[in-house]
Amino acid sequence: MGEGEDGERLDRLLARRLAIPRSQAQSLIASEAVHIGGRTPSRSRRLRAGEEIEVTWSGPGIVPTPAAIPVLYEDSDLIVVNKPRGLPVHPGGPGTTVSVVSILLARGPLAPAAPNRPGVVHRLDAATTGALVVAKTPVALEGLIAQFRARTVNKEYLAVVHGALAVDEGTIAGRIGRDGARPWRMRIGGAKDAHTEFSVLGRREDEALLVVRPRTGRTHQIRVHLATIGHPVVGDPLYGRGGGPLLLHAWRLGFRHPASGAWMECEAEPPPEFASWFGG
């Protein structure tokens, strides 16, 4: 429990911390998923400074799925995985869709969060591979989300793009929003500012390998920005030519551990489609 929350009703605090309706927070308490000092509290319980709240909740509609997933780092607070291609981070709606969170829930509990998104701090598109951090505890969830919002997380992606770039590095700035005519796509000219930096690691006749550093975290940001400058990501069916796997990989992820404060760097090995660029 944080400072300034002394005396607050339990159901109100849970609703705010978990980003869920107050009625859902009350249901969690009624189902005995919430404990304080080993006991089940009432929903109107007034909290006292220093108390620890334990919540056991996977989110509705998620069935744990025993399956292998590459783990880059794990402790009692968080887990970092190398997300495979084609695997969504969380279910798109109620059901039993296999996802990163359904696989991780088979390993153990994740931090309560919005419905169908336990432990989710940030997301990668299903077609994108690479480093993804998931929180196991409410403290880790809150701390990691705060870092992403403050833009202090270091994110580096590898992207193979069409065309020969005339520069070795650059910055792309363009506000991004949803395409009203095609709501499954994003477009330049929206309401949210977005900034992306890139450097060229290698060139071929009609392709280039980039390291891309998004300074904001908008949906499809890298894909939209690179397409905007005439160099869409290879395999991108929405903003490019499609015709193969999307060659976009979350390569490196750096952040401060939400419990210890130590700086962490996790590097995810790229999938085989990138091997030829590294002498493989």
Image (tube, rainbow, N blue to C red):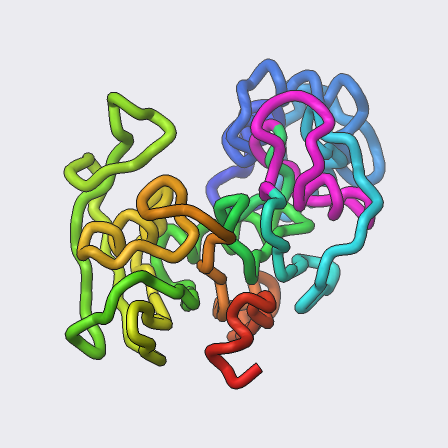
Q: Nearer the viewer, residue 7 or 258?
A: 258
Q: Quadrant of residue 91?
A: top right
The reply to whether residue 264 is visible in this rendering is no
Judge from the rendering whether residue 196 lies leftward or rightward of residue 83; answer left or right: left
Q: Main secondary structure of the magenta part?
A: loop
Residue 75 place in picture, x, y as percent: 73, 64
Location of residue 277 with respect to 128 vertically, above or below:
below
Judge from the rendering whether residue 40 lies leftward or rightward of residue 186; answer left or right: right
Location of residue 235 with respect to 199 vertically, above or below:
above
Residue furthest bottom in the image: 279
For the point 54% across and 25% down, the residue is: 20
Image quadrant occupied by the C terminus: bottom right
Q: Nearer the viewer, residue 188 or 135?
A: 188
Q: Is residue 113 magenta?
A: yes
Residue 116 place in picture, x, y as percent: 62, 30
| Number of numbered tags placed on the structure image | 0
Q: Quadrant of residue 160?
A: bottom left
For the point 84% across and 38% down, the residue is: 38
Residue 216 place in picture, x, y as percent: 31, 54
Q: Is residue 164 magenta?
A: no
Q: Quadrant of residue 268?
A: bottom right
Which range is magenta? 88-115
Residue 272 place in picture, x, y as percent: 60, 68
